[in-house]
Image (cartoon, rainbow, N blue to C red):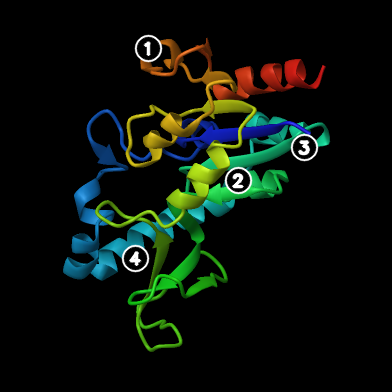
Amino acid sequence: MKHIVVFTGAGISAESGLKTFRGSDGLWEGYRVEDVATPEAWKRDPERVQHFYNVRRKAVLEAKPNAAHLALVALEDKYRVTIVTQNIDDLHERAGSSRVLHLHGLITKAQSDINPSLTYTIAGSEIRMGECCELGSQLRPHVVWFGEPVPAMGTAIGICRQADIFIVVGTSLQVYPAAGLLDEIPVRAAKYFIDPQASTLSRLSDVTCVDDKATVAVPILVEKLMA
């Protein structure tokens, strides 16, 4: 059974109503990224950071998987499919995908402030100040912030090296270290890049670029691969 690796970014979730991480003005829903997505921001004003992610988490829980998420699930009838995502939402899982690796964490979980390996599923949409892990430390969002290591990178590299078909959906391919995964794709692998600006952004060789949004292009590609 051939192995399809799908690498997804904010573009696929944007079509479910979730805002992309960094807008054209350098802000994330009115916030400077440096004020809500760094370890320094957490140390400086943990209540502000906690509130920001509580609001984001509520939006994630209210969002629904779209046609692109659902189409990728259908590939599992014919292929081994692994999704490597930069997104912190759980839309791939809720759509029904069975193998999903989150590079940057999962917003529906909390983690210990002092030991990131201690993670907990959140009941509802909020982590409250004063809620602590088993070590007595404050719980924070299970999200990899700028300046923090990406623990899942080693696993992601191994997955990408096994790809027979590699599909990129909804990412600018500009954020490192995640963008470095492109260097791990086997030369022999068939490659597809779906994004409204795919032809402009692509730095892959021998790639089929589809300059369209995910909800339009992914179902078409899936139908082609399933034929």
Q: Residues within 10 Å of mark 3 (few under 14, many from 20)?
A: some
Q: Residue 99 placed where, x, y %?
A: 66, 48
Please give the name of the residue rendered at 20% of the width and 61% of the height, measured from the top-left corner: 41
Q: Which quadrant of the view contains residue 205?
A: top left
* Residue corresponding to mark 3: 76
User: Could one spot residue 89 in this view of the protein?
Assistant: no
**SS at badge 2:** helix
Residue 91's disc is 2
Mark in the foreground, 3 or 4: 3
- Compute the Cα span from label 1 to label 3: 30 Å
Residue 50's disc is 4
- Compute the Cα span from label 1 to label 4: 36 Å
Q: Which badge, 1 or 4, comes first in the chain's sequence?
A: 4
Please give the name of the residue rendered at 51% of the width and 30% of the height, measured from the top-left corner: 185
Q: Mark 3 and mark 2 in contact? Answer it, CB < 8 Å.
A: no
- Compute the Cα span from label 3 to label 4: 37 Å
Camera-nearest residue between 146 and 33? 146
Camera-nearest residue between 42 and 144? 144
Camera-nearest residue between 204 and 104? 204
- Compute the Cα span from label 3 to label 2: 16 Å
- Compute the Cα span from label 4 to label 2: 22 Å
